[in-house]
Image (cartoon, rainbow, N blue to C red):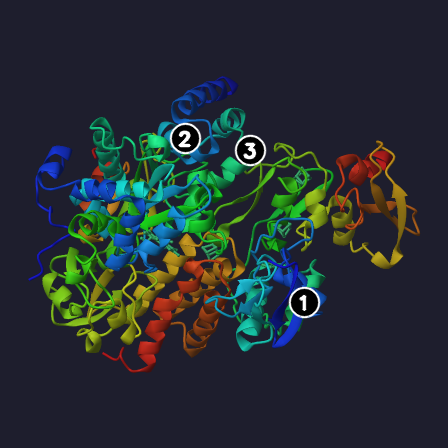
Amino acid sequence: MQDTFAILIDGKEAAAHAGETILDALRRAQVDTPTLCTHEHLTPAKACRACVVELKGSRALVASCERKVEPGMELRTDSRRVLEARRGVFELLLSQNDVSAAPALVLQAERAGADRERYRGQRYDRGLHDDNELYVRDYDKCILCYRCVEACGPDVQNTFALTVAGRGFSAGIAAGYGESLPDSACVFCGNCVAVCPTGALMDKREHTLRAEGRWDESRYDVVQTTCSYCGVGCQLELHVDRRSNQIVKVTSPGDHSITQGFLCVKGRYGYSFVEA
Amino acid sequence: MPEDDRAVRERVRRLIDETGRERTQLLEVLHKVQAEYSHVPRAAAEAIEQEMNVPIADTYGVVTFYDLLSDKPVGRRVLRICEDVTCSLHGAAELAARAERAIGPEGEPSPDGAVSWTRCACLGLCDKAPAALFAEEPLAPLSETAIAKVGEGHA
Amino acid sequence: MHEPVLLRRQGHPDATLEAYVADGGLKGFARTREIGQAATVAVVTESGLVGRGGAGFPTGRKWESVRTAAESERYFVLNADESEPGTFKDRVMIETDPYMVLEGVLIACYAIAATRAYIYVRGEYRGAARLLAAAATQLAAAGHLDGIAPGGRPLAIEVRHGGGAYICGEETALFRSIEGYRGEPMSKPPFPTVAGLFRKPTVINNVETIANIPDILSRGAGWLQRYGTDRSPGVKLFSVSGHVGRPGVYELPFGAPLQELLDLAQAGRDLRALLLGGAAGTFVFPGDFDMPLSYEGAQSRAATLGSGALIAFDQGTDLWRVAERLGNFFAHESCGQCVPCRIGTRRQHEMLAALADGSGGDGERERIATLGQVMTDASICGLGQTASTAVRSLIDAESRGLLAV
Ligand SMILES: Cc1cc2nc3c(=O)[nH]c(=O)nc-3n(C[C@H](O)[C@H](O)[C@H](O)COP(=O)(O)O)c2cc1C
Ligand code: SF4
Ligand code: SF4
Ligand code: SF4
Ligand code: FES
């Protein structure tokens, strides 16, 4: 197979590179494609189906985040079938989930023309898991994107503290043997929190500040620094409240060559120990 | 309690010895654990992690995926009443209501732990509808009398 | 009257290896060893056999791609997970003739040079699993498994017990289950023949498909075509249940009229409708009871044979209540992996429950149809893709006035 070849996107010829996904090719061609579950540093879960496209010769639509390009592929991203499928995916999520902490999802849903009311029905009611000092889990907000499981598992952390449990509508994320995080194998690296796209996993501090109505991103400066706990050289972004001079959150840039956005407990949550 | 857990781990280790330690044997091992303890206790998942290198969370994910496995105790013998199309034409709903009266709430073991009952998907016994399994063997066609016997411990 | 072929040993005393051999068993396998792998696959291809597990894929083509695969580690999997509502023909096939099923497995394994064979039996079929395991032990003891595996080794046959999950009948979910994981389907491609069990080239066949193999080998490539139609050669097992006098499994040549099957099962003349093809099938009304039971015959009436399940409903049956049961089944059996099916099957069930209770209306009908299209188009696997097929066929029938009493 040659390394670069042509594919057809909505009737227009576009370049594609062997080994990349359809989504990669769509992005290069600047075709706006909604995505929820896929993440640049994790195995595609192909679970949300927001990114589906029509592929000539395939009966069902295909997930562009997972399917690799092949020479001569003919894709449609603007057909009625594609647009209705995507809209349906968002409408189903809106019918079940608390999306109050997922502005990106809401925006994509609006763009897809989703009607919040179409599929009214039983919503998630799973309660808040607030069982440790570092982060909380609110699975009413979870869309089961598998990112946290993959980050905790072989893709990043190799701790394997998380799993998808149950089946069907009652499938959801669980820690350990369906227990609290401290009882599970969790080492509190917070990498699951870093990849969660919906706010279902949230640092405890952010969660508390939000609950008290005191979370205000306009007040936070981002200060770049290198973590000093060990010699690896992870880059940290300290989110500092200008008024109180307190650190409210620590992240790492997703494009950093060492971290790819992932940290350990000391880098991500060390500040809470320092300040406590 | 810790003594119990140790005994469970020991027993599960032996089950793994006789079944196989590769992950592909997980479901077979879990079937045996379920048969022995009427559920898969956490201590079993601990032994599985040590012996088979399957994370505890993974075992939990698998146990909660399959209808014949459970993380919480069920009765030592389970009555599974099919509630799918053919059996529902033959009175499955009434039989389930009868089971609730005779045995108790769905999924909950009787006080002595001997039996519990649950609704289930098509059992492939539609030619003998209304169908059920009791202690994993066919009990079909299921009758009110049979349910009463199960409830009284005479089945 | 069709003289049964697959079920010809029904009513015989308990199956033993001796009785099987005395009755002409293992001749197909002997023939395979005589003509070798390539010729065996050629016979199967030429016979016109297609899979009886629902998808109808040509069996010989599957075998050929694994036989010629570059990798030497390959697997054969017998799919005995049979969990489609209303379907029990594989159980009856195994109970009737476990040795014929296993002879088919031996032939398949030899033909594709399988490293190992897995027999995945649904966990609720304890009896069938025991029969197959015992038969495999007998075959091994008698030396019939010797020299089948590559390198002249004896073939290892492992019987695996499902955990109670309909989705594990879907081939990629079944592989995950054997591997020790949650039965969550994987994307296709890659297809099993390329990357199946343990991501190795794999042939997976349904029990009924495999039961055809010994006769095809012993009687020749043209034998299957003595039965059935040009486009659907052979015979088919039908599981009949519901409002009929004699529920059970019936064997008929493809193309036999649906009414003949109903007569065999002693259905009354006052049926309201049938569900043909299982939960993922379609409702069929009396006007179509002359339908030929072949793939093309069903297709011509916008129906499907699916797994060959037929559930009959008399005049007193509330078909919306039946639809509600189907909705419940899919919601319960969705693996939960993808959004359209995980949430969609739940919403579909809620709407069907409303229709069955009389509280739903045209809004529900319209939403079910819209949702059905989303599930069909965007779901990962066949479960979500077909979860609305039967229900939509009912809505369609209603709009054509077929539900009026
Ligand atoms: C949801 C679902 C359930 C299935 N269940 C079964 C089953 O119980 N038995 C079976 O043989 N095939 C089942 N299939 C079809 C299999 O995926 C596969 O096509 C079949 O086993 C191939 O065998 P065949 O070619 O001999 O038919 C199922 C498919 C889907 C999508
Ligand atoms: S904090 Fe780290 S170890 Fe704990 S569950 Fe999340 S990813 Fe796994
Ligand atoms: S908790 Fe977050 S990361 Fe994990 S599956 Fe749910 S939405 Fe995805
Ligand atoms: S369609 Fe349903 S059963 Fe299939 S992968 Fe998606 S959620 Fe699972
Ligand atoms: S982004 Fe492709 S399936 Fe979720």
Q: Are marks 2 and 1 in contact (CB under 8 Å)?
A: no
Q: Which mark is residue B55?
A: 3
The answer to which of B140 and C184 lies nearer the viewer is: C184
Q: Amino acid at mark 3?
A: Pro
Q: Residue at x 83, y 47 (%)?
A: A248
Coordinates of residue C392 in the picture (x, y in percent): 37, 72
Q: Which residue is tagged 1?
A: A15
Coordinates of residue B2 in the picture (x, y in percent): 52, 19
**Circle 1 marks a residue in which chain?**
A
Q: Is residue C69 above or below residue C265?
A: above
Where, by quadrant of the figure, is residue A233 drawn?
top right
Of all residues shown, which one is farthest toward the left? C1
Q: Residue at x 26, y 66 (%)?
A: C275
Specify whether B144 is left or right of A70: left
- Mark in the foreground, 2 or 1: 1
Residue B120 makes an appearance in the image: no
Q: Which mark is residue A97?
A: none
**Circle 2 marks a residue in which chain?**
B
Q: Is residue C112 above or below residue C305?
A: above
Local packing at callout 2 (Cα closer than 10 Å; few below 14, some 14-19, many 20+) is: many
